[in-house]
Image (spheres, rainbow, N blue to C red):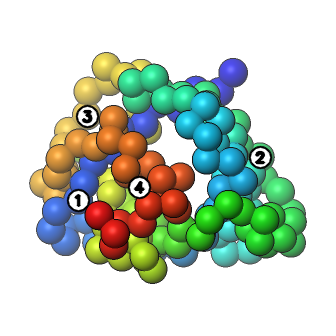
Amino acid sequence: MAIEIERKFLVTGEGWRQTDARRYSQGYLSRDPARTVRVRCVGAQAWLTIKGRSVGASRAEFEYEIAFADGEQLLKLCDGPLVDKFRHRVRHAGMLWEVDEFLGDNAGLVVAEIELSDEAQAFERPPWLGEEVTQDARYFNSNLAAHPFKHW
């Protein structure tokens, strides 16, 4: 089974703006916390991702590349509005951070994620890293589709 171990943080300042970003558009076929099913389109590629319930910073994750045309059609079947964002990939102290700058109804929200090999793995915090929100369900992308940041 594939396990994702990911910690999520709010972002402060602008020091993370070091790279070109890619536009992501994603939607949810299921937002049930026990089994989210996401469709994501980036450039001319698309993926279908199934994630299990989070336990700490870990959860089961299965991701499959699908035909882009299928991804576009599946986005039309999604429950609720899409989540659009720019993703910046930033290296800091040998680790890869993915910084998501949200658009649309989630504009103004910037979140950084780091994937780890285990929950206890140490890492150096970049100076632009703010409060940890790993356990705060409001920041799950699936929740941002149903409860956008602008309504908080």
Amino acid on which the number 3 mark rests in the picture = Phe
Q: Label 3: state its secondary structure.
A: loop
Amino acid on which the number 1 mark rests in the picture = Val
Q: Earlier in the sequence, mark 3 or mark 4?
A: 4
Q: Earlier in the sequence, mark 2 or mark 3?
A: 2
* Disc 2 packing (10 Å; few <14; some 14–19; many ≥20): few
Amino acid on which the number 4 mark rests in the picture = Glu
Q: Earlier in the sequence, mark 2 or mark 4?
A: 2
| Quadrant position of residue 41 | bottom right
Q: Label 2: state its secondary structure.
A: strand
- Residue under label 1: 11
Q: Earlier in the sequence, mark 1 or mark 2?
A: 1
Locate residue 41 relative to residue 86 in the image: left or right. Answer: right
User: Separation of disc 1 and disc 2 at Cα?
Assistant: 29 Å
Q: Are marks 3 and 4 in contact (CB under 8 Å)?
A: no
- Residue under label 3: 123
Give the farthest residue toward the bottom.
104
Amino acid on which the number 2 mark rests in the picture = Tyr
- Residue under label 4: 98
In this picture, is 27 found above or below 95? Answer: below
Q: Earlier in the sequence, mark 4 or mark 1?
A: 1
In this picture, is 93 found above or below 4? Answer: below
- Residue under label 2: 64
Q: Earlier in the sequence, mark 1 or mark 3?
A: 1
Q: How far from the left and from the top, in percent, is residue 135?
A: 33, 35
User: Separation of disc 2 and disc 4 at Cα?
Assistant: 20 Å
Question: Would you say residue 97 is visible in this rendering?
Answer: no
Quarter occupied by the C terminus:
bottom left
